[in-house]
Amino acid sequence: MFYRVTVYLLGMFVNFFGVAMVIHATLGAGFWTSFFIGLSDLFGMTVGFWYGVFQFLIIFINAKLMKQHPEFMALIPVVLESFILDFWLEIVFVSFDISAAPVVIKALALGTGMAAIGLGVAIYILPQFPRAPVDQLFLAISARFNLSLRMGQTLVAVIVATMAILIGGPVGIGTAVLVLFLGSVIQFWYTRAYRLYYAVKPEAAPQEEWL
């Protein structure tokens, strides 16, 4: 259990380090992050606070879509991720500003952030603990309306990005880059992290062959 919890938390910290890097690249954050930043700018409170509020609401949206009881165990990653996101944004990166840096530096920060997000997500899903509600939303929409997973994810991305634009969130080229390439980056890291994760704890490996 200690091993699984450690890997779970490590994945969260790496993931939100990447989120913070993407935000500070100022080329456009991820669609969800852009929405939460827009809310923070509009109404105050931290980005992590709005992250937590909407994740809580999405628990009930997912339950309605799937015609199931709300999955309150999903509150565990919501609380953890809200604090970790604010840890990076409000403490570690509070004085980090490259808004006036050359575009190549911003692009490097964006690329580093996307790589870290992909690695963090790949690590975070390995212990198979509860996932954040936003990670389940496109799955619920796909199942409810008989859509492909890619179509469900795209639908969520378009709706949330549109809402972010309407409230002044930082949607830009970085947002498009994440929508187009983050899935491939996660898959790249996952195939490698999977092998390493079960190499350390081979007795926990599932029966199917490694990816």
Image (cartoon, rainbow, N blue to C red):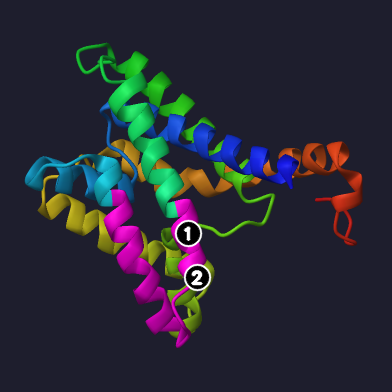
Left or right of 121: which side holds 207?
right
Q: Looking at numbered disc 2 in the image, what kind of residue is underneath it?
A: Leu
Outermost residue toward the bottom in this view: 67
Asked if residue 161 is positioned above or below residue 176 in the image, the reply reads below
User: 49 and 58: which one is in front?
Assistant: 49
Residues rendered magenta in the picture:
51-77
Outermost residue toward the left in this view: 42
Helix, strand or loop for the magenta stretch, by majority: helix
**Labelled disc at residue 135:** 1
Is residue 57 highlighted in magenta?
A: yes
Tell me if residue 174 can be seen: yes
The percent coordinates of residue 146 (x first, y second) are 49, 84
The percent coordinates of residue 196 (x first, y second) are 80, 36
**What residue is shown with label 2?**
139
Q: Where on the picture, by quarter, is residue 166?
A: bottom left
Asked if residue 116 is positioned above or below residue 78 in the image, the reply reads above
Verify CB contact (< 8 Å) between mark 1 and mark 2.
yes
- Going 40% across and 22% down the picture, which residue do you hit? 109
Outermost residue toward the front in this view: 2
Left or right of 39: which side holds 116?
right
Left or right of 124: which side holds 28?
left
How crowded pointer 2 is (Cα within 10 Å; few <14, some 14-19, many 20+) is rated as: some
Q: Looking at numbered disc 1 in the image, what kind of residue is underneath it?
A: Asp
Question: Helix, strand or loop at disc 1?
Answer: helix
User: 209 and 203: which one is in front?
Assistant: 203
Question: Helix, strand or loop at disc 2?
Answer: helix
- Going 38% across and 26% down the picture, which residue do you hit? 21
- Going 81% across and 41% down the picture, which residue do you hit? 195
Is residue 114 highlighted in magenta?
A: no
Q: Where on the picture, by quarter, is residue 168?
A: top left
Tell me if residue 188 can be seen: no
